[in-house]
Image (cartoon, rainbow, N blue to C red):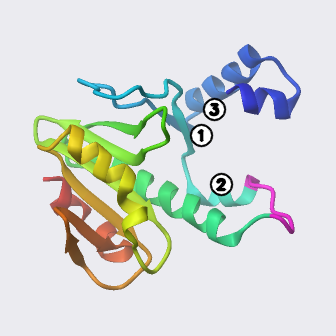
Amino acid sequence: MAEVAREAAVGRRMAENYFCALEDLLLGARLPVFSKRAKRKLVSHRKFYFFDVGVYRAVRPVGPLDQPEYIGGVALESLFFQNLRAVNHYLNLNYDLYYYRTAAGAEVDFVAYGERGLKAFEIKSKRDISPKDVTGLGSFLEDYPMAQGHVIYGGSAKMHRQGIEIWPAAEALKSLPKILE
C-alpha cells in the first residue's frame, strides 16, 4: 500500500481508501494472508485483484520495459481467481479464500480453506514447470501436510510430482468444481 501511495503521490491512508472504494463498487477484491497456525513469519498486507482480467489488462500501463510474460502471468492468476470465486459461490462450497506469503518470500497464489479441506494453488503462465516454480507451494505443504497442492500452468500435460497435482490451465478451469469438491 505504501508503494502504491508513493507512486500515486498520495498518503498511505488515501491509497487505502481508494482500494476500499474499488471493493465497495465491486471493481476489485482483496485477499487476506492465510495465517492459521502459521509456523513462519508472514506478510500482513492483502493482495488486490480487479474483478475482471480484461480490466487489469486495460488499465495496466505497458511500455518497452514491461515483460509480456509477467503481464500474462498476472492475467492468468486473475482469471483463475475470478473462476475460483465464482465456483466457490455458485456451488456453495463455503471456502474462505486467501493467499500465503512468508516474510522470506515463499508464496502460494491462492489458498482455499473450509470444511471440505485445505487446497493450495500456484499459478504459472509458462509452459514448463521447474522445481524452483513450486518452492513456495512446497514450503506451504511442509507447514500444512493435510493440504492438497496444485500448480496451474500454461503447458498441456497433466502431471503429478512430489504430492503436487500439475494441471494445464484450460483443463484446470474446466475441472475447478471437481478440484474443489
Q: Are marks 2 and 1 in contact (CB under 8 Å)?
A: yes
Q: Dot 1 corresponds to which residue?
A: 27
Identify the amino acid type marked 1: Leu
Identify the image quadrant of residue 154.
bottom left
Region in magenta: 59-65
Identify the element where label 3 is drawn.
Answer: helix
Residue plotted at (27% across, 42% down): 112
**Crowding at label 2, few (<14), some or many (≥20) Cα neighbours within 10 Å?**
some
Q: Is residue 41 left or right of residue 114?
A: right
**Crowding at label 1, few (<14), some or many (≥20) Cα neighbours within 10 Å?**
some
Q: Are marks 3 and 2 in contact (CB under 8 Å)?
A: no
Q: Dot 3 corresponds to which residue?
A: 22
Identify the element where label 1 is drawn.
Answer: loop
Identify the amino acid type marked 2: Val
Identify the mark nearer the N-term, 1 or 3.
Answer: 3
Q: Is residue 134 left or right of residue 158?
A: right
State the separation of the CA atoms marked 2 and 1: 9 Å
Identify the image quadrant of residue 163.
bottom left
Quarter the N terminus occupies: top right
Rendered location of residue 129, percent (x, y): 39, 73
Q: Is residue 12 magenta?
A: no
Q: Is residue 47 left or right of residue 85?
A: right
Q: Are marks 1 and 3 in contact (CB under 8 Å)?
A: yes
Q: Do we see residue 159 in this rendering?
A: yes
Identify the element where label 2 is drawn.
Answer: helix
Rendered location of residue 44, percent (x, y): 49, 24
Q: Is residue 128 left or right of residue 50?
A: left
